[in-house]
């Protein structure tokens, strides 16, 4: 994937859980509330229609304030790639103020784990810088740690 250092924020980590389980957690509304935002914030609602053009809607409680985050899936390749954006909502309705497109890449790692790459693609360098200043690396890093911990608890 061609990354632009001005507009794309990204990192890669190795997770000690199988790729199929990481995929299940990312694509099932029942799992999303357990990891998707850094604690103590929480997901209070999640609605997924896992298909290109399908909805990926979440509502967060951040310090007592409800924040709706509606988007759609742009690409879905089972257990390999998940791309979603807030630039559109279901029905391809353009968002008035889109923020980013997220790209998750999953591949098998040694010992049955997962190589996990997260990319946040922005429309402008300014938006990417704002996201970085908001704590992209700490926030998304915390989310992937929470995901790994949660997924480990689902393993037999």
Image (cartoon, helix red, strand yellow):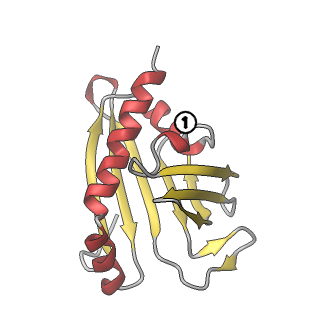
Q: Position of residue 17 (x, y in %)?
A: 37, 28
Q: Position of residue 154 (x, y in %)?
A: 48, 23
Q: Nearer the viewer, residue 136 or 26?
A: 136
Identity of the residue drawn at 53% across and 57% down: 61
Name the residue that disc number 1 marks: 24
Q: Position of residue 10 (x, y in %)?
A: 29, 61
Q: Is residue 123 left or right of residue 51?
A: left
Q: Is residue 101 left or right of residue 146?
A: right
Residue 154 lies, with reference to residue 106, above or below; the image says above
Identity of the residue drawn at 36% across and 85% down: 124
Residue at the right extreme of this rendering: 91
Identity of the residue drawn at 52% across and 44% down: 26
Q: Nearer the viewer, residue 104 or 35?
A: 35
Q: Position of residue 130 (x, y in %)?
A: 31, 78
Quarter where residue 89 is shown: bottom right
Residue 63 lies, with reference to residue 113, above or below; the image says below
Q: Is residue 14 left or right of residue 143?
A: left
Q: Is residue 86 left or right of residue 7?
A: right
Neighbour class for label 1 at 10 Å: few (<14), some, many (≥20)? some
Instruction: Report whether residue 1 is seen.
Output: yes
Identity of the residue drawn at 54% across and 84% down: 97
Residue at the front extreme of this rendering: 64
Q: Quadrant of the N terminus?
A: bottom left
Residue 85 lies, with reference to residue 16, above or below; the image says below
The kind of secondary structure element at disc 1 is helix
Residue 143 lies, with reference to residue 6, above or below; the image says above
Instruction: Report whether residue 78 is seen.
Output: no
How many badges with numbers are in the image? 1
């Amino acid at each position: 994937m061609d990354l632009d250092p001005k507009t794309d924020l990204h990192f890669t980590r190795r997770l000690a859980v199988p790729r199929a389980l990481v995929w299940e957690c990312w694509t099932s509304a029942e799992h999303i509330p357990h990891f998707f935002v850094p604690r103590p914030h929480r997901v209070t609602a999640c609605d997924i229609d896992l298909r290109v053009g399908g909805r990926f809607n979440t509502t967060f409680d951040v310090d007592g304030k409800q924040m709706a985050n509606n988007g759609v899936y742009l690409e879905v390749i089972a257990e390999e790639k998940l791309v979603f954006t807030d630039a559109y909502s279901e029905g391809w309705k353009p968002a008035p103020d889109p923020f980013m497109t997220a790209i998750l890449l999953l591949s098998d790692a040694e010992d049955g784990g997962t190589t996990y790459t997260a990319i946040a693609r922005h429309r402008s360098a300014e938006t990417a810088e704002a996201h970085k200043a908001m704590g992209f690396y700490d926030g998304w890093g915390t989310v992937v740690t929470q995901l790994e911990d949660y997924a480990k608890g689902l393993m037999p």
